[in-house]
Structures are given as structure tokens and as C-alpha cells.
């Protein structure tokens, strides 16, 4: 029985991804973001239990990869598609001086006579998230050099980045003071940039501790400390979900600084 426990948890991750997709197309799309966070939680524990129970097998690896594609690839892609779509529909509501009610925006899309409805095609750019996530996961499956560090942004990090953005947009939907179309362009630009980072040839730190001592784990502890400070500040100032995109950006910045430091030390050691 114990050999099935990790796979059952992985199927839980997959279920979260499916529910996230379903909610992304509902009148409460932000709920899908919470299911992506739930999938992240289960994704951690399926690997954890596989190692603890010593039942790590090829089936589990393949199942985990497929679940990750749904939860951290397809789901955030659909969520960003609907987030940008709702912003565009919000713009159309305001342009036509119609009351802004996000949950009715989908219905409005089909009855609006506005000439700017071609804008509704823009959110399709978000499809780049599942497409490049699939490439990222396929590369990871055949890679042999990502045990101590990641090459490119991990799909779970990318997924929670966009999930948090979506939650923040919907939480402040009726308070957005800048142009909604301008915000859509900004979000889609970020979407393309972050998706390209999935397959960028950039080594990024992996939070895998062989020991819990400071030596050898300096960068990991610095990053975790920065995460804690960011979360506490976000809780004090506004919304905890503000912390997530900042943490992902810190992760990228600290990793790049770490790479530059390593390269500098290697050059100095050769001389």
C-alpha cells in the first residue's frame, strides 16, 4: 500500500490543477489560483513521501511530470488568459459607461457591439505559459545536471507568480486606477518574459539542503531570510500575495548574483 501513497498525492496535485482550470473559466476565476497553491503544497509532499518511503519509481516520475504540466503549466496559462480577458472586458464596460461587474463580463463579451472586441484576442498570448512549461518539463525529465541547481525558472515558481498576480488583480478589480488595457499589455509582456525564463540557460539555486549548516548553504539561507522579511512586510502593509511575485524576483536576482560571484571566484582561482 505504501508504494501508492506518493502517486495518490500526485493525483491530488493533478486534481488541484483540473479544478484550477475549471474555476479559471467560472465567474470566480481567482479561486483557481488557490488550487494552484494547493497543487504546489501536494507537489512538495509527493516527492517528500517518495523519498521517506523509498518508493521512488519511474511511474511516479512520469505521473509527477504530467501533473505538473496541468497544475503549473495549463492552469496558470488559463488563469492569465481569463485575468487579461476580464480586464479588457472591464475596459469595454467603462468605455460604454456600463456598471463594472466582473462576474458578468463573460456574458457581456458576446453582446457588446464595441469595435474594440479584437482586444479579446490579446489574452491568447497567455498560451505561451503551458507551451513553454511543456518544453521546460520535457527538458527537466531528460536532464542530468539539475540535481543541485535548476537550469531556468522552475514551473511551480512561474505558476505561483501568475497565480498571485491574478489574485491581486481580482482583489483590486474595482480599484484599478491605471488604464485596464495598459495593464493587460504590461501583464502580457511579463507573461512572455517569465515564460522565456522557463527555458533560459540560467542556473538558479535549488532549495535542497544536504546539511543544515551555514557553510555551503549561505545563498539558500540568505534567500529564505529575504522571503521571511518580504512576507512579514507584505502582511503588515497590504496583502500576503504581494510577497509572492517579489519573492520570485528575489529568487532570480539572488541566483544571478550567486552565478556572477561563482564565476568571479573561478576566474580568480585560475590566476
Image (cartoon, rainbow, N blue to C red):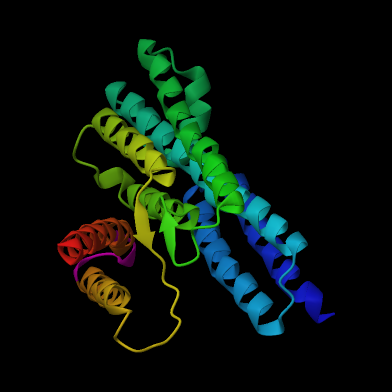
Q: Which quadrant of the figure contains the C terminus?
A: bottom left
Give the percent coordinates (x, y) of residue 236: 21, 74
Q: Nearer the viewer, residue 159 or 221?
A: 221
Q: On the picture, is 87 further left or further right than 59?
A: left
Give the percent coordinates (x, y) of residue 50: 68, 75
User: Is 198 located above or below residue 4 in the figure?
Assistant: above
Q: In terms of secondary structure, what is the magenta stretch mainly?
A: helix
* Residue 247 location, quadrant: bottom left
Give the percent coordinates (x, y) of residue 234: 24, 68
Determine the residue located farthest toward the bottom in the rendered image: 213
Decide if residue 207 is in sight here.
yes
Q: Which quadrant of the figure contains the N terminus?
A: bottom right
Q: Which residues are magenta?
A: 237-242
Determine the residue located farthest toward the front in the rendered image: 271
Q: Is residue 239 magenta?
A: yes
User: Is 129 located above or below residue 258 in the figure?
Assistant: above
x 62%, y 48%: residue: 70
x 44%, y 18%: residue: 112
* Residue 88 location, quadrant: top left
Q: On the picture, is 120 further left or further right than 59?
A: left
Give the percent coordinates (x, y) of residue 151: 42, 53
User: Is 219 located above or below residue 88 in the figure?
Assistant: below
x 49%, y 58%: residue: 145
Amino acid at each position: 500500500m505504501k508504494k501508492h501513497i506518493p502517486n495518490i498525492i500526485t493525483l491530488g496535485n493533478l486534481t488541484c490543477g483540473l479544478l484550477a482550470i475549471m474555476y479559471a473559466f467560472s465567474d470566480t476565476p481567482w479561486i483557481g489560483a488557490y488550487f494552484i497553491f494547493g497543487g504546489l503544497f501536494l507537489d512538495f509532499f509527493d516527492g517528500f513521501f517518495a523519498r521517506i518511503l523509498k518508493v521512488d519509481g519511474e511511474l511516479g516520475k512520469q505521473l509527477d511530470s504530467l501533473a505538473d504540466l496541468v497544475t503549473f503549466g495549463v492552469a496558470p496559462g488559463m488563469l492569465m488568459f481569463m485575468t487579461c480577458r476580464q480586464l479588457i472586458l472591464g475596459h469595454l464596460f467603462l468605455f460604454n459607461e456600463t456598471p463594472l461587474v466582473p462576474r458578468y463580463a463573460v456574458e457581456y463579451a458576446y453582446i457588446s457591439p464595441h469595435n474594440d472586441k479584437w482586444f479579446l484576442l490579446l489574452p491568447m498570448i497567455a498560451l505561451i505559459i503551458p507551451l513553454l512549461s511543456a518544453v521546460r518539463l520535457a527538458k527537466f525529465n531528460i536532464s542530468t545536471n539539475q540535481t543541485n541547481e535548476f537550469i531556468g525558472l522552475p514551473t511551480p515558481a512561474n505558476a505561483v507568480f501568475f497565480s498571485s498576480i491574478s489574485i491581486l488583480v481580482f482583489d483590486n478589480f474595482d480599484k484599478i486606477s491605471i488604464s485596464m488595457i495598459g495593464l493587460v499589455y504590461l501583464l502580457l509582456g511579463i507573461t512572455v518574459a517569465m515564460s522565456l525564463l522557463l527555458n533560459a540557460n540560467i542556473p538558479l539555486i535549488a532549495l535542497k539542503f544536504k546539511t543544515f549548516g551555514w557553510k555551503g548553504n549561505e545563498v539558500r539561507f540568505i534567500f529564505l531570510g529575504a522571503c521571511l522579511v518580504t512576507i512579514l512586510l507584505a502582511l503588515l502593509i497590504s496583502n500576503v500575495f504581494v510577497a509572492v511575485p517579489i519573492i520570485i524576483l528575489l529568487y532570480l536576482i539572488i541566483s544571478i548574483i550567486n552565478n556572477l560571484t561563482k564565476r568571479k571566484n573561478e576566474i580568480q582561482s585560475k590566476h
